[in-house]
């Protein structure tokens, strides 16, 4: 009799437990789905948690308008396979409605604007629990994030005043207008995610694997040529074999040079990687040492 | 690969952050950009060595004050195991954070500064580890470089600590002389301590046997959620979803459901599309029964010949987390497994002095970070086991109904005398 679960089986069991707690205790949960690998794994775990029933909540994509086509295709395919409802919260609409002001200049990004769009959508849809794919190993401020993370009526996080979280007993109590962010992948590392993608054959958008693409170098990162970026005169466009390590706003998500065309090859690369995921490929996350903490306080993912 | 969860505790400046930074660095979890950032900051602040502690300092307010104030989780892996560290702060006022970190830990790592020896705080850390039933305790005697790697000093500290630990409920106690700053006995044996024959810290963490820590005897399955697809293909499917708290369940097993007392047999155990021949903790599964009986969230599936105690009067040790003190007569909301009830504190029996282990009776309240023994009268029955025997069915959290905060955590001792 084997009575010790493997690392991945234990993580899977913990995440499924979290999904079921939320489905049982909240009225209107929603799962944030960007089409990235973390949200892909999160969705897969939700699918398992309620099988053979359908996932009992909807998905939400906070859409910057700056997407990779492959990711949108993937998103729509998964939504129809699972028969769930997709809510698209559009940053463009927030801009048009005057809720936020678009940044200007060649480095303009819509990343920060997403917070307003996200919070507006949570309020207007009256969502009380919002699943996010954040992992504690990603970044220092996230290392302190609770699995059930309370947000006040302004959607803000107060890192100094978090509820103690013990055993697997989660406190989801909140008043109307407040909500709880739920992080089922809290204890997963990047490598765990990839190993799970391999073991469980989780499908990902094709841009996660090596392919040929026109890119140019900016701030030490490879940015894909696309309609959402302005290329400066001294930036040289060339075709290289690359893959993406995260999927974000197409205007500021960098690719890495890679020949990894299968998940096994990606795992070898991840295991040998010398630079953190965000440091390598997210211009928006390199703002300052405290960048993520500040954004999370405001209500970011 | 297995997983080991451990909590670290130490007084401020004992070198806890440095030790964790060292473990992360030596197991190659630190990436170039992270190390560069830390080297840069160390230089800016005028340190003459790279301060590894900076690797784990999370939040801005903490960086500003230069202390760790909240539980932070860290991850690293070796080919043998994946580790989750609950990094908890040392100050007295943060006892609650250590309790939080210890609640899910298999092992506790307590740091002591070799120059200072066993302090009040070191005692408190081991009391908490023992209360929370962390079965394995490792005492790292740090900064051995500052006492010339003196064997006698090490032995002296071990003896003093052992004497105190003897009064506690700790199964497995290990002492390791280290220097977190220089890496002695962290990953490789130090040439500076030829007299030390035990394992290095990492070797110990990789090999400590935790297989028998979980309860595989008492079958307990708190029902979390009822799965009813109402679809064409699974028209009559009704699965009771939950995490196995303890014991094992197999198809064909006779079961009894609390609180109704109805019995049935397990028709199948599902984990997604797979049918399992066995489920054990901490698996999340869905159980189907042969008979249609009315079961909902908060019920518990057990074996008829081995039942938990059904009670509305719970005798428990509680650790208080909130500025508003616990007082006799107060009413709170309780979460125990998948069951939520209301409860009144019927008596505060005593406060535990965690430094001396004295029971201080005649208290009218329990303040933040204090530990005491209470009786709770609940509005509906709970299905409990003694926490020592079962960490899942023996634990509960206490929630303030006005503020929704988690104000306390309790470990069940048994049934209290009805007041
Ligand atoms: N000499 C020496 N200094 C150490 C050792 N471990 C930590 N320190 C120093 O002790 C101070 C406090 O360490 P830190 O890790 O921040 O302690 P924490 O408050 O327990 O996290 C720092 O200046 C460290 O460099 C050690 O093994 N030897």
Image (tube, coloured by chain):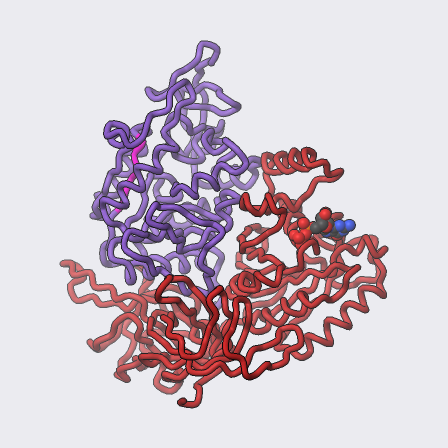
Chain colours: A purple, B red
Name the residue rendered at 24%, 38% in the picture.
A88
Q: Which residue is drawn at 28% across and 28% down?
A: A95
Magenta highlight range: A59-64
Q: Where is residue B352 in the image (x, y as percent from the top left)?
A: 58, 77
Q: Residue furthest top?
A: A233
Is residue A16 covered in magenta?
A: no
In front of the other: A286 or B12: B12
Residue A62 is a magenta residue: yes
Q: Quadrant of residue B258?
A: bottom left
The answer to whether residue B278 is seen in the rendering is no
Depth check: B362 or B178 in front? B362
- Residue drawn at point x = 46 percent, y = 61 percent: A165
Q: Can residue A249 be seen at all in this image of the molecule?
A: yes
Q: Position of residue B58 (x, y in %)?
A: 55, 46
Where in the figure is residue A93, as x and y percent of width and height? Answer: 24, 31
- Which residue is farthest left? B232
């Amino acid at each position: 009799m084997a009575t010790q679960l493997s690392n991945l089986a234990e993580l899977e069991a913990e995440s499924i437990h979290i999904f079921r707690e939320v489905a049982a205790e909240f009225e209107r949960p929603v799962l944030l789905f960007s089409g990235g690998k973390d949200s892909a794994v999160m969705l897969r775990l939700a699918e398992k948690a309620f099988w053979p029933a359908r996932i009992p909540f909807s998905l939400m994509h906070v859409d910057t308008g700056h997407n990779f086509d492959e990711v949108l295709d993937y998103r729509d395919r998964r939504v129809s396979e699972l028969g769930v409802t997709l809510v698209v919260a559009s940053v463009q609409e927030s801009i048009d409605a005057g809720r936020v002001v678009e940044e200007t200049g060649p480095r303009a990004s819509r990343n920060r604007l997403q917070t307003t769009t996200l919070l507006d959508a949570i309020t207007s849809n009256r969502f009380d629990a919002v699943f996010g794919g954040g992992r504690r190993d990603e970044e220092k401020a996230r290392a302190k994030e609770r699995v059930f993370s309370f947000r006040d009526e302004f959607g803000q996080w107060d890192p100094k005043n978090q509820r103690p979280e013990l055993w697997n007993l989660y406190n989801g109590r909140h008043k109307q207008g407040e909500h709880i962010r739920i992080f089922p992948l809290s204890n997963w590392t990047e490598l765990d995610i990839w190993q799970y993608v391999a073991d469980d054959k989780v499908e990902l958008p094709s841009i996660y694997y090596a392919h040929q693409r026109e890119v140019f170098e900016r701030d030490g990162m490879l940015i894909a040529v696309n309609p959402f970026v302005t290329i400066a005169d001294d930036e040289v466009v060339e075709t290289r074999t690359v893959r993406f390590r995260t999927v974000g706003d197409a205007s500021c998500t960098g690719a890495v040079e890679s020949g990894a065309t299968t998940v096994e090859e990606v795992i070898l690369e991840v295991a040998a990687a010398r630079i953190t995921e965000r440091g390598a490929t997210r211009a928006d996350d390199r703002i300052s040492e405290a960048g993520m903490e500040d954004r999370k306080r405001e209500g970011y993912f | 690969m297995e997983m080991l969860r451990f909590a670290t505790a130490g007084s401020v400046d004992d070198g806890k952050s440095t030790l964790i930074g060292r473990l992360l660095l030596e197991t190659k979890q630190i990436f170039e950009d992270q190390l560069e950032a830390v080297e840069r900051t160390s230089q800016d602040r005028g340190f003459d060595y790279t301060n590894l502690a900076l690797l784990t300092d999370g939040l801005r307010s903490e960086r500003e004050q230069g202390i760790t104030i909240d539980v932070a989780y860290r991850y690293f892996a070796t080919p043998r195991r994946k580790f989750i560290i609950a990094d908890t702060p040392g100050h007295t006022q943060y006892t609650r954070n250590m309790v939080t970190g210890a609640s899910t830990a298999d092992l506790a790592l307590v740091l002591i500064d070799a120059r200072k020896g066993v302090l009040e705080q070191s005692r408190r850390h081991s009391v908490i580890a023992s209360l929370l039933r962390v079965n394995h305790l490792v005492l790292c005697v740090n900064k051995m470089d500052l006492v010339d790697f003196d064997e006698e000093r090490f032995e002296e500290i071990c003896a003093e600590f052992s004497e105190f630990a003897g009064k506690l409920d700790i199964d497995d106690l290990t002492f390791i002389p280290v220097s977190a700053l220089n890496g002695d006995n962290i990953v490789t044996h130090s040439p500076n301590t030829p007299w030390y024959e035990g394992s290095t810290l990492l070797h110990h963490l990789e090999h400590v046997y935790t297989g028998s820590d979980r309860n595989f005897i008492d079958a307990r399955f708190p029902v979390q959620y009822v799965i009813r697809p109402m679809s064409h293909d699974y028209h009559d499917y009704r699965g009771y979803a939950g995490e196995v708290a303890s014991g094992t369940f197999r198809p064909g097993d006779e079961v009894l459901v609390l609180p109704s007392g109805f019995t049935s047999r397990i028709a199948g155990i599902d984990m997604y599309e797979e049918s399992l021949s066995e489920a054990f903790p901490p698996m999340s599964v869905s159980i189907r029964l042969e008979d249609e009986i009315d079961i909902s969230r908060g019920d518990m599936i057990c074996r008829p010949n081995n039942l938990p105690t059904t009670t509305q009067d719970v005798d428990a040790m509680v650790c208080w987390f909130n500025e508003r003190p616990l007082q006799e007569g107060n009413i709170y909301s309780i979460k125990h497994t998948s069951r939520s009830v209301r409860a009144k504190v019927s008596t505060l029996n005593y406060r535990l002095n965690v430094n001396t282990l004295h029971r201080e009776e005649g208290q009218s309240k329990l303040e933040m970070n204090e530990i005491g023994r209470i009786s709770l009268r609940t509005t509906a029955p709970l299905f409990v086991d003694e926490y020592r025997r079962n960490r899942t069915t023996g634990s509960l959290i206490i929630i303030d109904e006005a503020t929704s905060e988690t104000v306390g955590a309790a470990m069940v001792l048994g049934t209290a005398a009805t007041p």
